[in-house]
Image (tube, grey):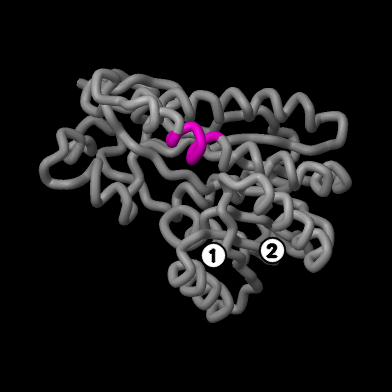
Amino acid sequence: MPVSSQRLAGKTAVITGTASGQGRAAALAFAEAGAVVVGCDMDDDGAAATVHKVTAAGGRMSSSRVDLTDETAVAAWAQDVAANQGPVHILYANAAVTRFAPVEQLTFADWKWNVEHEMDVVFLPVKYFWPQLIQVRDAAVVLVGSTAGVTGSMTNGRLAHTAAKGAVVAMTKQLAAEGAPYGLRVNAVSPGMIRTAATEGNLLAADHPMRSIAGSIPLGRIGTPEEVAKCALFLASDEASYVTGANLMVDGGWSAVLPG
């Protein structure tokens, strides 16, 4: 049976970090699937551009400026969404920012910054949208882990990033357990190397040792934001109605095999 192009029709999807990259791709994909998208970002211009792209394609989307590391701001945003959008069916906690450094160069300040911008930005939206989600029997949460959360790296110093994304993968399993009595499914996508403006500026830059990483990826190429968004869309949809607590690797097989 073919998958319906409107598989999220009648649903409201909250997506964090929609100004660019994987968040923008998700906003476009979820809206195309029929969802009313509620986005947020601190990049006002990028967020507005995403809303324009969604609406120009016939979708429905709004966006707010929200600092996801600020508990008061996230709580107020969740209350506003409840008052103005009605029931929330999907939360895609996409937003995150990271700093890379090997352990001997990693400052305690940078460690705490990574925890705040990769863990807190997941925990706070989950916490404050949870009361709305558990009222909807077919609700879904999708978190964003990473290959960094399940493997180490010989070419990129990333202890804080690895610890934070490992925590997100672990959070997925615990939240799946806590959501199950309410019919709330919680899963994660864990992207590998994805070509975005951010990765072009660091991991894929000409002077970075990971610039040739495609040669170690079984499928032989770097992934796209759209490929991650499609996997998140599947997990958020009724097609994944018997899937919870899963961590879907979206990495071209990178984490499944040894190089060479």
Number of the label disc, if any, that sits on residue 35: 2
Q: Quadrant of the C terminus?
A: top left
Q: Main secondary structure of the magenta part?
A: helix
Rendering coords of residue 22 (x, y %): 46, 53
Q: Nearer the viewer, residue 117 or 257?
A: 117
Would you say residue 118 sits in the magenta stretch?
yes
Q: Tag 2 or tag 1, which sits nearer the N-term?
A: 1
Q: Secondary structure at mark 2?
A: loop
Would you say residue 116 sits in the magenta stretch?
yes
> What is the quadrant of residue 208 in the picture?
top left
Horizontal relation, residue 109 to residue 44: left or right: left
Label 1 belongs to which residue? Answer: 28
Q: Which residue is found at the position 77% from the left and 52% from the top?
A: 89
Q: Residues within 10 Å of mark 2 (few under 14, many from 20)?
A: many
Rendering coords of residue 123 (x, y %): 63, 37
> What is the quadrant of residue 185 in the picture?
top right
Q: Nearer the viewer, residue 42 or 205?
A: 42
Against 179, is 166 above or below? Answer: above
Against 88, is 250 above or below? Answer: above
Horizontal relation, residue 89 to residue 148: left or right: right
Q: Which residue is found at the position 29% from the left and 47% from the top?
A: 199
Q: Nearer the viewer, residue 100 or 143?
A: 100
Rendering coords of residue 93 (x, y %): 59, 45
Against 106, is 81 above or below? Answer: below
Mark 1–mark 2 Cα distance, whole angstroms, equals 10 Å
Q: Amino acid at mark 1?
A: Leu
Q: Amino acid at mark 2?
A: Ala
Read off the magenta span: 113-119
Q: Secondary structure at mark 1?
A: helix
